């Protein structure tokens, strides 16, 4: 969309929310707008995720214009508490899908005739369910499972060159292949919903000609950003929303710095969210040079519980060099921050008899994250997952 189209869409959404939203119309900026004043987006207070979660019904609008189409209700995953019922319109869905299609250009999704998709089981699709659908150029197979070995066999049997799966599932599939010495014929892997582990990028790089296309979205806002096929950075979905990365004082962060993801959706008239704090953090690209977007993110750091805190209060993105861990034979590993100075290193080893020494784990953490943390090793037989089948590679309990 052109700049004037975005400005027009924003003006219309602000006026709609200021007039019809039970939550926003009581705020000072909305009253000023109804009085005829012009209000800049940057002067509107950030809408905290906790408020939307606790007072969801106050963000619903009952008198949605007929031109917006049917109003639908979608549930969030509930990863930050109880699932939240989000209302969206058919028109919003069409625009969001069109924006996603724009961001996907350049990756060559349309060139793949054999496509596999791994999805979490549900009441309608119990574990082991397989569906097959014809596509314009080939077939799509879907498997509902949380078993990575079952998923590996499924991808191998379909001969898929394109895989859709959560990062955790993809990591498990490729790690199993590496363990048994089998390379899948994948050329493109598309992920969403979780933070990308560095180990996953490493495994994908071992598959000849295979690329990773990751995209970032929430149920509340739709797609927010997508990796660019040209530069590899994340470009915002600015055809249907406005993306801001803000510090703890709600000011824009400088290039190279990490901040809160704040989104203003431009077309959902059933549940306007103005400067909505998603609960995630991202890092703004330091040296942005790409003809496809004027703004980029280096990476998505995840939710606050994915970030660790130093004793001085600084938030950092926990990272480990996967090479020595894989060489040692670890199948899975996870860091849990229990205090400002204590980190628990959980791991699953290929060999039930082998163990990672406390000293080695301490050295690996210090090499990747610096000194200041005391590392406690804990060998486990299996990594725990959430009710939705997700795996948190880094978790802060501080």
Image (spheres, rainbow, N blue to C red):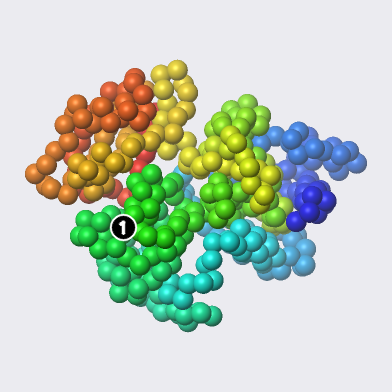
Which quadrant does the N terminus fall into?
bottom right
Q: Which residue is mark 1?
A: 174
Q: Please tell me which residue is depicted at 28% across the width and 23% down the height of the picture.
A: 374
Asked where in the image residue 335 lies, by quadrant, the reply is top left
**Residue 219 % position (x, y):** 55, 55
User: Can the viewer see residue 56 in this picture?
Assistant: no
SS under mark 1: helix
User: Going by the image, does 174 lie left or right of 250?
Assistant: left
Asked whether 147 or 287 is in front, the reply is: 287
User: Can the viewer see residue 223 in this picture?
Assistant: yes
User: Which residue extends farthest left?
Assistant: 353
Asked where in the image residue 185 lies, by quadrant, the reply is bottom left
The number of discs equals 1
User: Which residue extends farthest right?
Assistant: 36
Q: Residues within 10 Å of mark 1 (few under 14, many from 20)?
A: many
Relative to 16, is 45 above or below?
above
Asked whether 325 or 215 is in front, the reply is: 325
Q: Please tell me which residue is depicted at 43% across the width and 72% down the height of the picture.
A: 115
Relative to 388, is 294 above or below?
above
Asked where in the image residue 309 lies, by quadrant, the reply is top left
**Residue 148 % position (x, y):** 29, 60
Q: Please tell me which residue is depicted at 56% across the width and 32% down the height of the picture.
A: 256
Q: Please tell me which residue is depicted at 47% across the width and 36% down the height of the picture.
A: 304
**Residue 243 % position (x, y):** 65, 44
**Residue 15 % position (x, y):** 81, 48
User: Which residue extends farthest top?
Assistant: 312
User: Going by the image, does 11 lie left or right of 92?
Assistant: right
Which quadrant does the C terminus fall into?
top left
């Amino acid at each position: 969309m052109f700049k004037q189209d975005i400005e027009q869409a924003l003006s219309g959404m602000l006026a709609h929310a200021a007039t019809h939203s039970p939550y926003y119309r009581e705020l000072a900026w909305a009253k000023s707008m109804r009085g005829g004043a012009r209000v800049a987006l940057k002067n509107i207070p950030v809408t905290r995720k906790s408020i939307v979660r606790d007072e969801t019904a106050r963000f619903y609008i009952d008198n949605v214009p007929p031109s917006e189409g049917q109003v639908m209700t979608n549930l969030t995953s509930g990863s930050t508490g109880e699932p939240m019922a989000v209302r969206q319109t058919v028109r919003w869905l069409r625009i969001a899908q069109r924006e996603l299609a724009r961001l996907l250009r350049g990756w060559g999704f349309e060139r793949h005739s054999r496509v596999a998709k791994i999805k979490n089981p549900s009441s309608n699709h119990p574990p082991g369910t397989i569906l097959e659908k014809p596509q314009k150029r080939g077939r799509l197979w879907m498997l509902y499972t949380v078993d990575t070995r079952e998923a590996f066999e499924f991808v191998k049997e379909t001969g898929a060159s394109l895989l859709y799966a959560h990062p955790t599932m993809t990591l498990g599939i490729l790690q199993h292949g590496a363990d048994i010495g089998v390379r899948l014929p994948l050329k493109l892997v598309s992920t969403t919903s979780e933070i990308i582990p560095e180990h996953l990028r490493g495994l994908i790089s071992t598959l000849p000609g295979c690329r990773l296309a990751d995209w970032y979205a929430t149920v509340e806002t739709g797609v927010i950003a997508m990796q660019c096929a040209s530069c590899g950075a994340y470009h915002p979905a600015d055809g249907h929303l406005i993306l801001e990365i803000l510090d703890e004082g709600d000011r824009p962060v400088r290039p190279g710095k990490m901040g809160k993801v704040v989104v203003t959706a431009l077309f959902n008239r059933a549940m306007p969210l103005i400067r909505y704090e998603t609960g995630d953090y991202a890092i703004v690209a330091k040296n942005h040079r790409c003809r496809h977007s004027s703004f980029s993110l280096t990476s998505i750091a995840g939710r606050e519980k994915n970030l660790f805190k130093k004793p001085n209060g600084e938030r950092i993105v926990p990272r480990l060099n996967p090479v020595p861990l894989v060489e040692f034979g670890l199948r899975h590993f996870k860091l849990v921050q229990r205090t400002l100075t204590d980190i628990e290193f959980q791991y699953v080893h290929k060999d039930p008899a082998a163990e990672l020494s406390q000293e080695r784990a301490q050295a690996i953490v210090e090499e990747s994250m610096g000194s200041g943390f005391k590392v406690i090793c804990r060998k486990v037989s299996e990594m725990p997952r959430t009710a939705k089948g997700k795996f948190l590679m880094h978790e802060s309990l501080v």
